[in-house]
Image: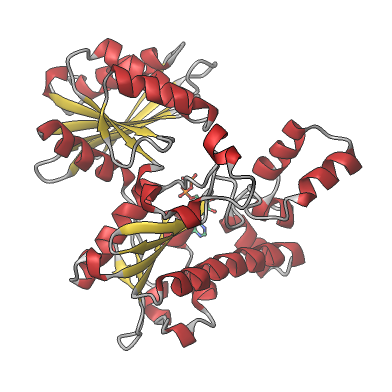
Amino acid sequence: MKILVINCGSSSLKYQLIDMTKEDALAKGLVERIGIDGSILTQKANDEKYVIEQPMKDHQDAIKLVLAALIDEKHGVIKDMSEISAVGHRVVHGGEKYATSVLIDDEVMKSLEECVKLAPLHNPPNIIGINACKALMPNTPMVAVFDTAFHQTIPEHAYIYPIPYELYKKYAVRKYGFHGTSHRYVSMKAAELMGKDVKDLKIITCHLGNGASICAVEGGKSVDTSMGFTPLEGIAMGTRSGNIDPAIIAFLMKELNISIDEVNDMLNKKSGVYGISGVSSDFRDIEEAAEKGEHRAQLALDIFHNRVKRFVGAYAALMGGVDCIVFTAGLGENSALSRAEICKGLEFLGFNIDEKKNNEGRGFAKEISTTDSKVKVYVIPTEEELMIARDTKEIVGK
Ligand code: ADP
């Protein structure tokens, strides 16, 4: 069974064609600049790179080209579109309705539309991608896999905000959490590496990329996560502030005489480690600047590590202990420095990192704790696309 996984952004689209017999990615691709000048598709398959540069006015054009690239005689990996058994779509927001992945039908499409007001930037391109695929592959079953679904097990006392309760009832203002597919994948993988049933484990997963979130996974279920109503809550990120005193927003609006949209823009795009360091949102640049002795770059790293550590401590307390911690995503998988800084001082909880293991090799799952560390520490590359394909296979197979 071959499954096409689609992750649609506003002007880009990532895709993978996965052969589920061995869970092999036959082709991986990225389409950029959809609807703007310089549209380009880059596909990696059969150890070669295939690039198509041609105008793509919308997502349907882009998906048409993806299918053409996949069946291309010279560079493709399948002979015919009919070899694609199903399509799995990444959808950011499923609201309170979807606690698991779901087969897409008209009712699901209606619900996705209803979630647009909760994720105005993300759900519209996801919906456009699904509609474009449906138009080109009307008989192929499609599945929606939500970033929010895994966190629907968070208990009421953790997802309700301490603001007037009616706002939850009337406007669905509550914690939803994101990166769910990644937290679910790496927590399952950690259990597998430990040789234990995920049901018996207390796991803290740290998805540290440009966007970043931490999750407490108890018995295989998300019981709390750092992102909230939107992906702005939680730890400081590349350009997002994470948690700040909410009174700062009103203060800045008054002092700077700026609009709510401008504050929103500041907190989402000009804050985080970028705002603090003034260097970059990329941790590689910040680490480099800090090494050269730039104070604000070092400060940005210190603030970031401190904030991650606070969540780790909070979640250990919440679950009454922790068996393992997982680092994943761009920074989590690649920065030995960040992993070491976050775990430093947590020896009292049973965290002990082996410096050599932490520093050697990347790109594969590995344990980086000492053999006698009470808490196992893992680096696990996230595989959201594979998780989407697995869900799609399971649902379509039913
Ligand atoms: P997203 O999917 O949210 O865009 P990624 O998971 O791709 O983010 O992570 C991107 C981030 O990972 C980059 O901003 C960069 O800061 C960080 N990163 C990648 N490689 C390294 C590295 N070798 N050292 C430190 N940070 C890294």
For this rendering, which residue is in front, 305 or 116? 116
Q: Quadrant of the N terminus?
A: top left
Name the side, left or right, on which 165 lies relative to 180.
right
Residue under the image location 18 percent in, 27 percent down? 86
Residue 196 versus residue 353 in the image, above or below:
above
Residue under the image location 40 percent in, 41 percent down? 147
Residue 353 versus residue 338 in the image, above or below:
below
Quarter of the view holding residue 167: top right
For this rendering, which residue is in front, 271 or 144? 144
For this rendering, which residue is in front, 163 or 182? 163
Mark yes or no: residue 65 visible: no
Residue 237 in percent (x, y) is at 59, 53
Quarter of the view holding residue 108: top left
The colour style of the image is: secondary structure
Name the side, left or right, on which 243 lies relative to 223.
right
Residue 12 versus residue 257 in the image, above or below:
above
Residue 29 in percent (x, y) is at 34, 32
